[in-house]
Image (spheres, helix red, strand yellow):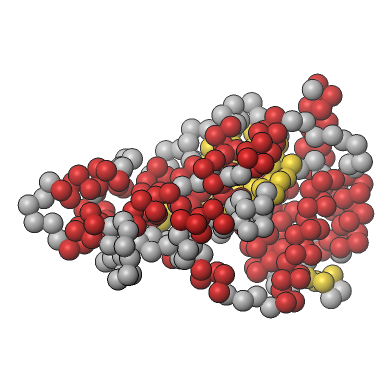
Amino acid sequence: MTRTLLVDGNSLLSTGFHGIKNMYNGSDHIGGLYHFLNTIRKHIDGYLITKVVVLWDGEENTYPRLKLYPEYKLNRRLKKKSQDDTQSYNRQKLRVQEYLEELYVRQATFNKCEADDGIGYYCEKSKDNNIIILTSDRDLLQLISPKVSLHVISLNKLFKDGDKVPLNGVNIPPSNVRLVKTICGDSSDNINGIKMVGVKSLIKIKPEITQKKVTLKEVIDTINTKDKPNQKEKNIVEGKTKNKEQKFNILDINYNIIGVGKQFLTQEAINGIKELTKDAIDPEGRDWKNALGLMMSDGILNILPKKDDSWVDFIRPFLRLTRIEKDFYKNK
């Protein structure tokens, strides 16, 4: 069975870009570039991966959710990056994409689409794969299933079906991630939750949330059976947030925008992801030696341990991936 590493490209690149600040080739920062390639190669070996797919956020990727919720990720949009940081990030992203083309890693970007939704749809369309998602975005924990596991980059930990996952200081089944974020909100994406209701107070209302899958309807039904619901419980039923000008039930909006998958993809993205799941990679023009040339140019060889075959150790996992993809192309 195919073992696929499904990578949230922007998440992985950002981790290295912001986390490895003192790695340079001359005047060019290469922390994001090196971390991206090194992480991929380690996971190809560590998880015995036979296929790697990287999905990137497209231009105007927040557009579908902004139509439903204008404040979506407003905190990030208002946070200005310096021109130097923006140029450095974009340069490293383009360079990473060059490497991936040479090393038989599938990748795609679709305008007005977030990588999260592409990842969700890829999992839906690849039920014959064992998939490991690589990301720091805990929204994607909701995708864990018998065939889908998730490696949280920031925790360096793999979560699989049957595990509980950490969310705001508590551990819950992955199937309840969407429910909890719907009610409690998500500050990282500027999504308001129900007024006065945090994860721990939600669990007091419905303790089963820590043990098994619970639906939004079940939470509301539980509250409605009480003779005297408290103010927090009333706020949940009425869908009230801290925003006094709110004129709609926030639960419906939150449930939609926190979900990931086909509903937020363009037709171009849907078609493109279907192709990624089944089409073979054309080997024409691709060669690991081209990637080695890029490593020399970018100074990555200078970072590796000081021994004659260090570059061989670095690139070996990609060579195994290359052989697998070439065989798949011939058989196709």
Quadrant in which the N terminus is drawn: top right
What percent of the width, then of the height, locates residue 61?
A: 61, 56
Q: Nearer the viewer, residue 267 or 327?
A: 267
Specify whether residue 200 is in view: no
Specify whether residue 274 is in view: yes
What percent of the width, then of the height, locates residue 10?
A: 65, 57
- Which residue appears at 70% of the width and 29% of the height? 278
Quadrant in which the C terminus is drawn: top right
Tell me: 304 left or right of 276.
right
Counting the numbered discs, the total is 0
Looking at the image, the residue that sits furthest to the left is 227
What percent of the width, then of the height, locates residue 75?
A: 51, 71
Q: Quadrant of residue 318?
A: top right
Q: In this view, does 320 lie above or below 62?
A: above
Q: Which of 200 and 59 is in front in this view?
A: 59
What percent of the width, then of the height, locates residue 156?
A: 57, 54
Tell me: 38 left or right of 79.
right
Tell me: 299 left or right of 16.
right
- Which residue appears at 57% of the width and 70% of the height? 77
- Which residue appears at 59% of the width and 52% of the height? 114
